[in-house]
């Protein structure tokens, strides 16, 4: 019986997995994201992941056919008459089911994730095909937080000598850079552009270069015309390096044990660190103004600096220390005063392009400037906004070294009355910490949902084979395909409930998600026990 089961199982699995693998290639072929030369390789790779769905049903089919033939030929009755208990007769079925259980666990937790990753990488390697097909459909190429549009595209017959594998020539190009909330941050447009495709260990990278283009910054509302514009390079391949679907059991457990350092959590964690950095800069500025009566802001590179005198920190602005006075700003070049300005107040918003050092911009309100290099002290023009300044005596290097456990206490300290931190920064810090905890929980729940889904799917194989064998032996006078159909329906229901349970878990309904994921297996088990009991009684 065991040999017959394995023979039919192998034959049935081969047929089902080939058909399902070709079905998995339909969507990439339909949207032209898979080149014709890669179809065979893609289907070959897809066969391994499709085993997780083919094995349970092919095992149930094999058990139904083999046990039905044994029952129809009265071999089961003969064995029972000779004193063999049905539990003993079904030992080959139990053995094959147990082997499938172990095999499914190994397959789902170690082998299938690797092949999912290879399938994604294969699609990424057809980067040129993906881009060309998107242009032909009039759609944008969406990669991460960058959208690239083009009216026409063609492959340059002469490859560039900059290490790129291919170069695309585009006309009518627009590239939109978005933030984490999906809102446009900057936009580049150009009549002509080139896209260089580089391949390396990190995947496929597309570098866009525009000639005679214009750039728009949404935050500042400014438009800049540049002879050459190079937006941020975009990476194809795996959308995320740590895609849970492509991670093994041990990698998923590693993610759950080290959530603060996960690749998806890092950007949110950096937001918390940036808020703490900015808060520390404000506290340092307030402390320096109280102790020495001045603060010096230095440009990147250290050549030029701006010394602010006679000011005190009020919320998020520098106000005159005494009524009816002004704030004095002295500009220094290599520590030599060259210009000064008297103003009613100074606003110092943080540099929107700075993501680590806590640099500020300097905006003087109604400045009256004069040149200090000339003895007459002639009037001078003062810049409307001076960008990218750092407080000279303030060091924020220790913020980057904070452990995750230290972040919450640090954010809590900002709410103290004597923290001298503007309410906007306090709110941003609390919001960033809440987003960090939420993102960590999302990553943890997503990893758990995959572990639960794989475990439930692994158990479905032995349960389906047991149900098919029990039904075939019980209803030996019925058609075998009829018995398989009866076993097939709860098997399909189980797959649907496993997938639905995974989605419910991701929606953070953990208990209900686990219940839904395993209810299908419970139904299979109850049906198998009922069929086995009826077979033994009759």
Image: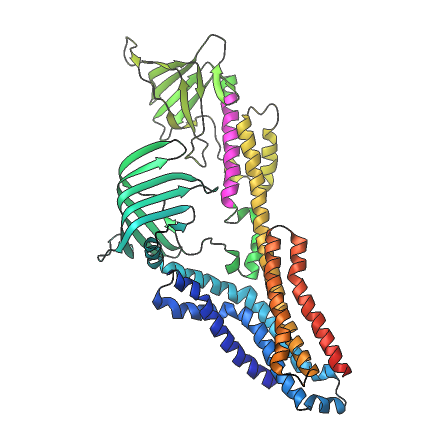
Task: Give the vertical position of 170 relative to 527 (above or below).
Answer: above
Q: Position of residue 310 (x, y in %)?
A: 46, 13
Rendered residue at 56%/31% (across/down): 427
> Where are the magenta residues, as a range?
266-287
For image coordinates 70% across by 74% down, the residue present is 528
Image quarter of residue 45: bottom left
- Residue at the farthest left position: 158
x and y, in percent, of residue 28 in the image: 41, 62
Percent across and percent down for residue 236 are 39, 54
In the image, is 96 to the left or to the right of 356?
Answer: right
- Image quarter of the C terminus: bottom right
Q: Count the marks.
A: 0
Residue 385 picture quarter: top left
**Residue at 60% of width from left, 63% of height from top?**
496
Q: Is residue 398 visible?
A: no
Is residue 74 something that shows in the picture?
A: yes
């Amino acid at each position: 019986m065991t040999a017959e089961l394995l023979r039919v199982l192998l034959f049935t699995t081969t047929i089902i997995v080939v058909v399902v693998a070709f079905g998995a290639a339909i969507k990439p072929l339909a949207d032209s994201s898979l080149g014709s030369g890669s179809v065979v390789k893609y289907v070959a790779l897809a066969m391994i992941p499709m085993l997780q769905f083919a094995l349970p049903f092919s095992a149930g089919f094999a058990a139904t056919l083999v046990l039905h033939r044994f029952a129809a030929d009265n071999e089961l009755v003969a064995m029972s008459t000779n004193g063999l208990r049905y539990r003993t007769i079904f030992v080959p079925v139990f053995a094959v089911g147990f082997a499938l259980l172990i095999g499914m666990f190994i397959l789902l937790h170690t082998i299938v994730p690797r092949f999912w990753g290879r399938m994604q990488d294969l699609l990424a390697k057809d980067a040129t095909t993906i881009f060309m097909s998107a242009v032909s459909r009039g759609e944008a190429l969406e990669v991460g937080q960058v959208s690239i549009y083009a009216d026409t595209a063609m492959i340059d017959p002469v490859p560039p000598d900059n290490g790129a594998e291919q170069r695309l020539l585009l006309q009518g190009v627009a590239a939109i850079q978005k933030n984490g909330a999906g809102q446009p941050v900057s936009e580049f447009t150009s009549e002509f552009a080139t896209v260089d495709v580089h391949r390396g260990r990190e995947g496929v990278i597309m570098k866009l270069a525009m000639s005679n283009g214009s750039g728009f910054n949404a935050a500042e509302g400014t438009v800049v015309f540049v002879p050459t514009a190079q937006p941020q390079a975009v990476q194809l391949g795996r959308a995320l390096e740590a895609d849970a679907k492509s991670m093994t059991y041990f990698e998923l457990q590693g993610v759950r044990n080290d959530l603060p350092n996960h690749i998806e959590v890092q950007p949110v964690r950096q937001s918390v660190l940036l808020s703490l950095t900015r808060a520390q800069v404000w506290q340092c500025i307030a402390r320096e103004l109280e102790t020495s009566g001045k603060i010096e802001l230095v440009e990147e590179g250290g050549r030029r600096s701006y010394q602010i005198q006679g000011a005190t920190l009020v919320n998020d602005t520098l106000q005159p220390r005494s009524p009816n006075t002004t704030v004095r700003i002295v500009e220094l070049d290599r520590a030599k005063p060259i210009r000064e300005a008297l103003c009613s107040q100074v606003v110092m918003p943080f540099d929107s392009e700075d993501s680590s050092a806590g640099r500020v911009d300097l905006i003087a309100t109604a400045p009256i400037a004069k040149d200090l290099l000339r003895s007459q002290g002639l009037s001078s023009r003062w810049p409307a906004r001076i960008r990218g300044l750092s407080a000279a005596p303030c060091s924020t290097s220790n913020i980057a070294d904070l452990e995750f456990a230290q972040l919450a206490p640090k954010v809590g300290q900002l709410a103290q009355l004597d923290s001298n931190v503007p309410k906007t920064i306090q709110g941003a810090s609390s919001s960033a910490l809440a987003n960090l905890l939420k993102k960590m929980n999302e990553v943890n729940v997503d990893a758990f949902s995959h572990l639960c889904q794989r475990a439930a799917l692994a158990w479905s194989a032995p349960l389906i084979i047991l149900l098919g064998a029990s039904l075939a032996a019980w209803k030996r006078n019925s058609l075998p395909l009829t018995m398989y159909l009866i076993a097939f329906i709860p098997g399909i229901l189980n797959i649907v409930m496993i997938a639905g349970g995974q989605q419910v878990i991701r929606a953070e309904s953990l208990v209900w998600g686990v219940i839904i994921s395993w209810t299908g297996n419970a139904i299979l088990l109850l049906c198998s026990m009922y069929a086995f009991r009826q077979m033994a009684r009759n």
